[in-house]
Amino acid sequence: MKACTIPRRLALLLPFALANCGDGDDGDYATFAPLRYDYLPPIQVNVASIDIQQRFIPAGVAPDVSAADPAPPVQVLREMGQDRVKAFGTSGKAVFAIDNAALTQNNDVIHGDFAVSLTIYDDDGAQKGFATAHVERTHTGEVKSLRRVLYDMTKAMMDDMNVEFEYQVRRNLKPFLTSATAPDAPVQQDPLNQPPTN
């Protein structure tokens, strides 16, 4: 990384000047859009509440590189659970668990491994159903911008996770899903034996 000298008179422009320092790869300074999934149809579960649990804790030291990701996997998986899994019942609960959210780097190989689960419990705490989803992805080759590579990997893995998670839930927890929606607004109808009103 080349050194930068910033004149005193440009002190107020420091953030902009710093953006021109470095190895020339703007991936390290780019703004990355948040990854959210509330635009996808919710998975409606016949329970009274949804509990989101983080069972995976990033190591925070090499080879873990998740802290460099503009979209930290634990946070993105949590938001996927909040966006996608909705309670549409009056009893019981569902636990959405983040079981793995690893991003590791060994030389020029970056590996991602995400896993989540959804477990249904009745009001007495007895487990009634279970589904798990797991996705992996590997990047091999030169890494010009670690942040860019990690973000792109996470985005692609989360696209896969949304598909796999919904497939596994609908396959393994079908009896606990509901298609309940808000009731439609009442439609005014004219009696059949009278002409329509204008």
Image: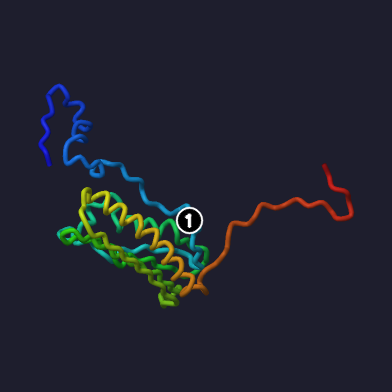
Image quadrant containing the C terminus: top right
Q: Is 88 left, or right, of 19 in this rendering?
A: right
Dot 1: few (<14), some (14–19), or many (≥20) neighbours within 10 Å?
Answer: few
Q: Nearer the viewer, residue 37 or 190?
A: 37
Q: Nearer the viewer, residue 46 or 177?
A: 177
Residue located at (30% from left, 57% from top): 73
Percent from the top left, x then y, of residue 68?
Answer: 22, 51
Percent from the top left, x then y, of residue 93?
Answer: 44, 68
**Colouring scheme, one of rainbow, by chain, secondary structure, one colour:** rainbow
Residue located at (30% from left, 42% from top): 31
Q: Nearer the viewer, residue 47 or 17?
A: 17
Residue located at (34% from left, 66% from top): 135
Residue located at (50% from left, 72% from top): 176
Image quadrant containing the N terminus: top left
Q: Residue 138 appears in which quarter of the rendering?
A: bottom left
Percent from the top left, x then y, of residue 186?
Answer: 70, 53
Count all numbered tags in the image, as a single digit.
Answer: 1
Q: Is 32 left, or right, of 61 in this rendering?
A: right
On screen, residue 133 above or below 197: below
On screen, residue 17 above or below 52: above
What amino acid is at disc 1? Leu
> Which residue is identified by label 1?
40
Q: Is 27 left, or right, of 161 in this rendering?
A: left
On screen, residue 36 above or below 100: above
Check the image and name the residue furthest to the top.
9
Percent from the top left, x then y, of residue 87?
Answer: 48, 63
Check the image and name the residue furthest to the front.
141
Q: Residue 65 appears in which quarter of the rendering?
A: bottom left
Q: Residue 178 appears in which quarter of the rendering?
A: bottom right
| Secondary structure of the residue carrying numbered label 1 | loop
